[in-house]
Image (cartoon, coloured by chain):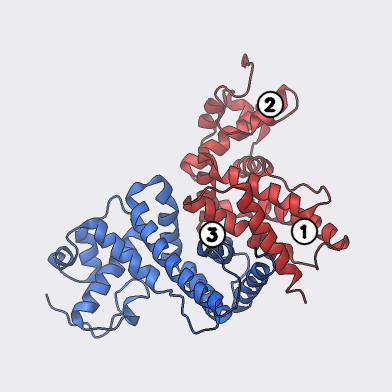
Chain colours: A red, B blue
């Protein structure tokens, strides 16, 4: 295997690898996951071929097999890396962190890959092969949101709230804005949504 | 053309025709639109064939051509009929009307046809053939919502609000609930969403 590439942005699909730290092995893994995501976005999961992923990633096929002998694990890892590019921070200012999160989510969903992956995720209901990794990612995101929200509740910023409900209230509008594409989703939109939802929760508690 | 069917529920795809009033011509048209929706949901718009629609509707092909010589108009009419099964009422109680609307929307989105049509609608961004009918339907729904909301604003029920923003806040969570399918979408959920959004709008105005 001859890796002569100087940067990750040359032939790599997706925005993930360029930002990922770590050594050569980590970069190779990230590139494989990017390629997997790209192929899943383009063709779905059903006909996924390691050879195609290896070619797109610029690595040998054995390198893909060695890292992920199991195809489901490979898909799961790719979706996790994709999803991990948008993380909810906890700076102690819930409103600010939520707005940042919604803006980052909208940016991710607006990419060609993001749109395609959303379609794969939405087909999860009819496709048990996708349901498990999708559910895992969703549970992970949800646990993180609940953690951040619980901290804000403990600080007295808002009444106790179910993370699932809050997630749907906040991200549902973002998904619709982006998928309709009738208006650009700006930081102002993220702020308006967050402000209405937080104010609403404060005035309907109990 | 021999129409011997006694009811619309025998071979008709979708829930629309059975509820539609009117004479035999109206029933035939409704059945053609149901069949169109069914074919669009299954195969998308690109390869739509009048022959297949006629067969599915149990009518002659000429009957489809006579009613809709233009294919785009046929698709548009089918999507309009589909969308028209969920209408926002205006009883003078905004909260109640919105909750009813969200419950009906969730029911529609939960059907197999509803899910399939959602995918067609979501592909509208990449498929100009669908964009126009989808935008028309959305504009029509939005105008109706703005009308009902403006009446509530005039009654002093809430501060002036942009219909588009309100639509995304209310229906975004419904879309996510249904597409994720992790929890059933009940009337209680519709009430919680509506209450938080209305309370939030009342406390963030200006």
Q: Is residue A121 left or right of residue A29?
A: left
Q: Which of the chains bears the disc numbered 1?
A: A
Instruction: Verify CB contact (< 8 Å) between mark 1 and mark 2.
Output: no
Residue A189: x percent and y percent?
61, 53
Vertical placement of A61 versus A44: above or below?
Answer: above
Q: Which of the chains bears the disc numbered 3?
A: A
Hey, which quadrant is residue B59 in on the image? bottom left
Mark 1 crowdedness (10 Å alpha carbons): few <14, some 14-19, many ≥20: some
Vertical placement of B157 versus A103: above or below?
Answer: below
- Mark 3 vs mark 1: same chain? yes
Q: Earlier in the sequence, mark 1 or mark 2?
A: 2
Mark 2 crowdedness (10 Å alpha carbons): few <14, some 14-19, many ≥20: some
Residue B206: x percent and y percent?
65, 63
Hey, which quadrant is residue B188 in on the image? bottom right
| The disc label shown at residue A27, or none | 2
- Residue B56 in sight in this render: yes
Q: Which residue is label 1 attached to?
A: A146
Which residue is more in the foreground, B93 or B43? B93
Residue, x 62% and y 13% (percent of image)?
A4
Q: CA distance from mark 3 to mark 2?
A: 33 Å
| The disc label shown at residue A69, or none | none
Hey, which quadrant is residue B80 in on the image? bottom left
Residue, x 57% and y 68% (percent of image)?
B160
Q: CA distance from mark 1 to mark 2?
A: 31 Å
Q: Which residue is label 3 attached to?
A: A125
Residue A150: x percent and y percent?
82, 60
């Amino acid at each position: 295997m001859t890796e002569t590439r100087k940067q990750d942005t040359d032939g790599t699909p997706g925005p993930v690898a360029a930002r990922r730290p770590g050594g050569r092995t980590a970069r190779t893994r990230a590139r494989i996951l990017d390629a997997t995501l790209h192929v899943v976005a383009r063709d779905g999961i059903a006909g996924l071929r390691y050879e195609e992923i290896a070619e797109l990633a610029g690595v040998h096929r054995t390198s893909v097999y060695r890292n992920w002998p199991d195809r489901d694990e490979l898909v799961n890892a790719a979706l996790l890396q994709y999803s991990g590019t948008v993380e909810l921070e906890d700076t102690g200012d819930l409103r600010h962190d939520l707005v940042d999160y919604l803006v980052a989510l909208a940016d991710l969903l607006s990419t060609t890959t993001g749109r395609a992956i959303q379609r794969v995720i939405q087909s999860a209901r009819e496709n048990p092969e996708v349901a498990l990794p999708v559910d895992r990612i969703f549970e992970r995101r949800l646990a993180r949101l609940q953690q951040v929200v619980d901290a804000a509740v403990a600080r007295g910023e808002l009444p106790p709230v179910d993370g699932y409900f809050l997630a749907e209230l906040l991200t549902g509008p973002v998904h619709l804005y982006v998928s309709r594409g009738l208006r650009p989703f700006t930081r102002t939109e993220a702020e308006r949504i967050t402000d209405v939802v937080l104010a609403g929760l404060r005035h309907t508690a109990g």
